[in-house]
Amino acid sequence: MPATPFEQAMERIDAMHADDPRSVHVGGGDLPQELWHAQRMSAWLQRLQESPDELTRLAVRAQHLQRWGIPRTEYPEGRRGYLAWRREQGRRAGALTAEAMENAGYSAEDASRVASMIRKEGLGRDEAVQAVEDCACLVFLENYFADFLHKVERDHMVRIVRKTWRKMSAQARELAMTIPLTPEAQQIVADALEAGSGQAEA
């Protein structure tokens, strides 16, 4: 039985993920880092939505597509450089995903829709775009948060967590509270939420 457009698109996306020269050690073997990241994104989506549609599943899977291909060092330091780098990453990942989808048989309309989801257009208003953002935040808290604690000044880390929390849906926040964290990380989250609550009351 021939593969469906969804299966073909996922295969193409994962093949591009697998080109990542970086690797992580998982389950007794090595896996391309970006492919591992994409799998964690998909795993969180399954917990966020009982039956996510194909386009949401594709957007979540491809959100970091070939991000390693544009190093952060190619952009200026500071927030302005970071935002420019992130915008280009979203544009490029969206374009690569749309091309893979059309090659797999999807319509240009569906491919464009997924590309806009990856660029997070309509965040806060579009449920599918929110799902992409929620998964990205949950993967960060689950897998990268602990490392950031040793690289970023504490007050800055509190601000990062507070901003991350604000971007998440209520359901994603509930899931985030189930992630095992070190005592230090738990305190950072507690301080971030307390600070955020204080600002909201003001």
Image (cartoon, rainbow, N blue to C red):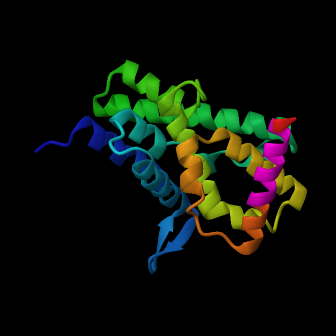
The foreground one among 111 and 144 is: 144
The foreground one among 121 and 101 is: 121
Characterize the magenta stretch by its predominant secondary structure.
helix
Can residue 64 be seen here? The reply is no
Q: Is residue 54 left or right of residue 172?
A: left
Identified at 33% across, 22% down, the residue is 107
Q: Position of residue 3 (x, y in %)?
A: 20, 43
**Residue 197 drawn in magenta:** yes
Q: Is residue 38 above or below residue 169?
A: below
What residue range appears in magenta? 189-200
The foreground one among 66 and 145 is: 145
* Residue closest to the far bottom: 28
Q: Position of residue 177 (x, y in %)?
A: 60, 59
Can residue 171 be seen here? The reply is yes
**Residue 52 drawn in magenta:** no
Q: Is residue 12 left or right of residue 173?
A: left
The foreground one among 17 and 62 is: 62
- Name the image quarter holding residue 187: bottom right
* Residue closest to the far left: 1
* Residue closest to the far front: 201
Question: Is the C terminus in the top left, top right, bottom left or bottom right quadrant?
Answer: top right
Identified at 69% across, 46% down, the residue is 165
Identified at 49% across, 61% down, the residue is 36
Q: Position of residue 24 (x, y in %)?
A: 55, 69
- How many numbered marks have been drawn onto this rendered protein structure? 0
- Name the image quarter holding residue 97: top left
Question: Is the N terminus in the top left, top right, bottom left or bottom right quadrant?
Answer: top left
Q: Position of residue 59 (x, y in %)?
A: 46, 38
